[in-house]
Image (cartoon, grey):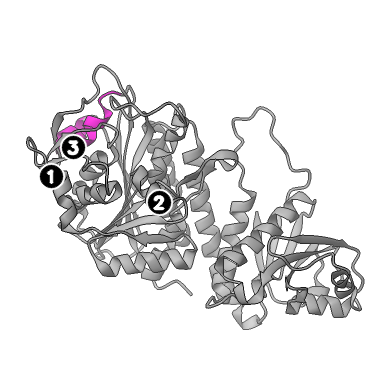
Amino acid sequence: MEFSIKSGSPEKQRSACVVVGIFEPRKLTLAAELLDNAARNHLSDIIRRGDMEGKAGSTLLLHNVPGTLCDRVLLVGLGKEKEFGDKEYSDAIRSAVRTLNETGSFDGTVFLTETGVRKRSTSWRVRQAAIVAQETIYRFDQFKSKKDKVRRPLRKLTFIVDRRNELAAAEAALNQGQAIAEGVTLAKNLANLPANVCTPAHLAETALKMAAEYKLEAQILEREEMAALGMHALLAVAQGSQQAPKLIVLHYKGGKGDEKPVVLIGKGVTFDTGGISLKPAAEMDEMKYDMCGAASVLGTIQAAAMMKLPINLTAIVPTTENMPGGAATRPGDIVTSMSGQTIEILNTDAEGRLILCDALTYAARFEPDTVIDVATLTGACVIALGHIATGLFANNDTLARELLQAGEEAHDRAWQMPLWSDYQELLKSPFADMANIGGRWGGSISAACFLARFTRKYVWAHLDIAGTAWKSGTDKGATGRPVPLLMHYLLKRAGKLS
């Protein structure tokens, strides 16, 4: 979809549809008032009759509004003005874009970006509007022989800012929002692919195509190279699969040559059966989403490259399937990780931490400033936080605060969980340096504690996205989280967030 930024009065817009907001109860925003004045109280007369109360999520499409140059006017309910925050704003944009797309408006001029949101700048409103708009029109139907086509899909959106001196900043924010939206779309597309298409080889091919398009440095490590490095934890997970594992490394060098990189590591289990510790059959199809960490890391480095952010960024993706078979790892097997630490594998379904621990060790060779891993790691995190917040663990309080703030800014929120040394006791093994599970209680914490044993050389955070990476049911599909969180963190680091 094409986006643009303008400043102007609503009644003077030559557009298929002008979008303005109405607060509850029946209170016109400034843009709506200007339209109403030009239309000689046409809007207020309609509202007075009870056609639009301003309730959040409600819309009313008007045709042939007098005194205007547009074909239609779309009224969008914003709810109560005092309660109009990040979520309410995003929901209003979503309602507007959905209605425009479904009612045959090729283009829309949106004045909602003029509407004040508590503690949020014009740049924030524009950036968020671009992200939400792309998310709203997203469809994944490439495997359908008969696609549900929109008769006259929305092609162009113009976001209005109320002052001309804000146009340059709004334009920059729009470019950021579009890049983040493209990163989210890449993450969704990869995650929504079936596992017979999105194999480790497919992820590697995608990374190489990205490297060519965005001038990234790429390296793909094969099984033999990983074995030579001592990555026997990662390779243990891959033993039962006919698909060859890969270790994907991408470098984006937008910063100074001597600047230490931020390293992002994404769990890339393209299908997780649980291995010998086989999962229940119900909803196992959703285990194609066990590579959402990898997808989000690839989406993030693409967005950073599109923005030409002045930072150095490295993405590492350990990717494999976790399958049962004659060669598969058994419960009770002991493997030696790249770090030299030995691991007793008590449950082969706790495989994500095994591939991540070798990737975390490998990351140290890049002398990182910061390392952040992203993984659909534990069902326990879903029990703790549901599908709203991502679980955040960190060995550095400053990094934790920065990621939490980025999540709030992006409305892609996280919640910090403890990483106390007391929990390390859960990982004791009588036969190896550690076990790969810590028992039933505090499962997301013991998993993070396991990873922490491989991160002592640098500042590190772990994002457990098991509850936020995809949706089930009628809205089934990948969310693209936490690409917005990561990008807002990187934007802030680069001094580009306004």
Residue 207 or 339: which is nearer the viewer?
339
Eyeballing the image, is 407 above or below 290? below
Residue 17 in sight here:
yes
Q: Report whether 267 appears left or right of 149.
A: left
Q: What number is the disc on residue 388?
A: none
Eyeballing the image, is 302 above or below 493? above
Residue 127 or 405: which is nearer the viewer?
405
Secondary structure beneath label 2: loop
- The CA span between labels 3 and 2 is 28 Å
Residue occupying the point 54% across, 69% down: 173
Secondary structure beneath label 3: loop
Task: Determine crowd level at label 1: few under 14, some 14-19, many 20+ residues with C-alpha closer than 10 A.
Answer: some
Q: Report whether 298 appears left or right of 99.
A: left
Q: What number is the disc on residue 215?
A: 2
Do residues under tags 3 and 2 come within 8 Å of each other at their CB atoms?
A: no
**Earlier sequence position, callout 3 versus callout 2:** 2
Residue beneath disc 1: 339
Q: Is residue 234 magenta?
A: yes
Residue occupying the point 76% across, 60% down: 59
Q: Is residue 187 magenta?
A: no
Q: What number is the disc on residue 231?
A: 3
Task: Determine crowd level at label 2: few under 14, some 14-19, many 20+ residues with C-alpha closer than 10 A.
Answer: few
Amino acid on which disc 1 is placed? Ser
Residues drawn in magenta: 224-240
Q: Of discs 2 and 1, which sits in the foreground?
A: 1
Rendering coords of residue 494 (x, y %) = 38, 69
Residue 58 or 244: which is nearer the viewer?
58
Query: Residue lying farthest top?
Result: 326
Query: Which quarter of the figure has residue 96?
Result: bottom right
Task: Determine crowd level at label 3: few under 14, some 14-19, many 20+ residues with C-alpha closer than 10 A.
Answer: many
- The CA span between labels 1 and 3 is 8 Å
Residue occupying the point 47% across, 40% down: 190
